[in-house]
Amino acid sequence: MLRIVDSFYVKSAVEPADYPASAYPEFAFAGRSNVGKSTLINLITNHHGLAKTSGSPGKTRLLNFFLTRYKLDDVEDTGFLQLTDLPGYGFAQVSQNEQEKWRRMVNKYFEQRAQLRGLFVLVDIRHPADKKDIQMLEMLRLREIDHCVIATKADKIPKTKQKKVLQELSRGLALGDVAIYPVSALKNTGIGKLTEFMESRL
Ligand SMILES: Nc1nc2c(ncn2[C@@H]2O[C@H](COP(=O)(O)OP(=O)(O)O)[C@@H](O)[C@H]2O)c(=O)[nH]1
Ligand SMILES: [Mg+2]
């Protein structure tokens, strides 16, 4: 089992020339503003306050890079991987110009980040499939970037209804074979699926 034991904020960047130069395997988190990206990064690194949460939603318009050290308990191995908090999308009051900047920044990242091993696309378990999320998933499919979907804030939906809600979301997002996992940062449930995803792609 993969366990993150150390984590640091490295830097924020827009242009590829400013990305951290290290070539460690990298995983990125995408989703609408306020969906829970920063909270999830803090939880899987077990480092509260590592990624800034909430406060001013939509204001984080940079790629935020984190370096972590992990341990694989079963084989007593250790190594480094990087996590990237992608700028949130889908804020209504954001101008056309800002949206274009966002698109350019994320496209460059997908195009140029050679060590990118996979994406976590976060969606709020309470909301039906959303156009912006569908567009993000489309982008990943076209670029053949490995990904799974994380349904956040699972604590907001009773356990008995989750299966049905996830099926509907999967259909609405046209996921096909792509997995969707419920996670609650509040209750600390479902995190194992994220670490499994990363471990299998190191
Ligand atoms: N109930 C609940 N709230 C959550 C969960 N994850 C995040 N939140 C809340 O959602 C808000 C936005 O979270 P944040 O991580 O800043 O979202 P980001 O904009 O995607 O980085 C914060 O108020 C969090 O406390 C969760 O699993 N359950
Ligand atoms: Mg955030």
Image (cartoon, helix red, strand yellow):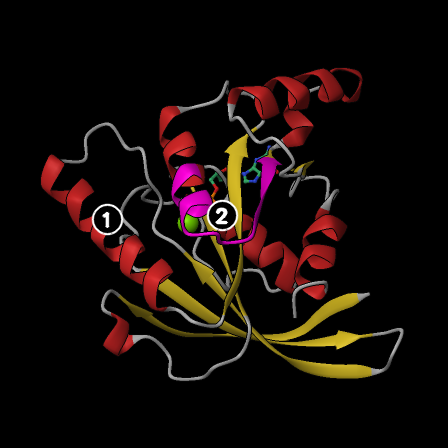
Q: Can you give x and y, in whole percent of width and height, for residue 7 in the image?
A: 57, 74
Is residue 86 visible from the viewing direction of this image? Answer: yes
Circle nearer the N terminus (1, 2): 2
Residue 184 location, quadrant: top right
**In this view of the protein, which residue sits in the foreground, 42 or 183?**
183
Is residue 34 visible from the viewing direction of this image? Answer: no
Q: Mark 1 Cα within 10 Å, few/some/many (few <14, many 20+)?
A: some
Vertical side of 157 occupied by 177: above or below: below
Q: Give the range drawn in magenta.
A: 138-151
Q: Name the residue under label 2.
A: 37
Residue displayed at 39% across by 54% down: 86
Q: Can you give x and y, in whole percent of width and height, for residue 107 in the image?
A: 29, 54
**In this view of the protein, which residue sits in the foreground, 133 or 7?**
133
Q: Can you give x and y, in whole percent of width and height, for residue 97 in the image?
A: 10, 42
Q: Would you say 36 lies left or right of 150 here?
A: left
Residue displayed at 27% across by 72% down: 16
Q: Would you say 37 lies left or right of 73 here?
A: left
Residue reaching furthest right? Answer: 74
Residue displayed at 45% across by 50% down: 53
Q: Name the residue under label 1.
A: 102
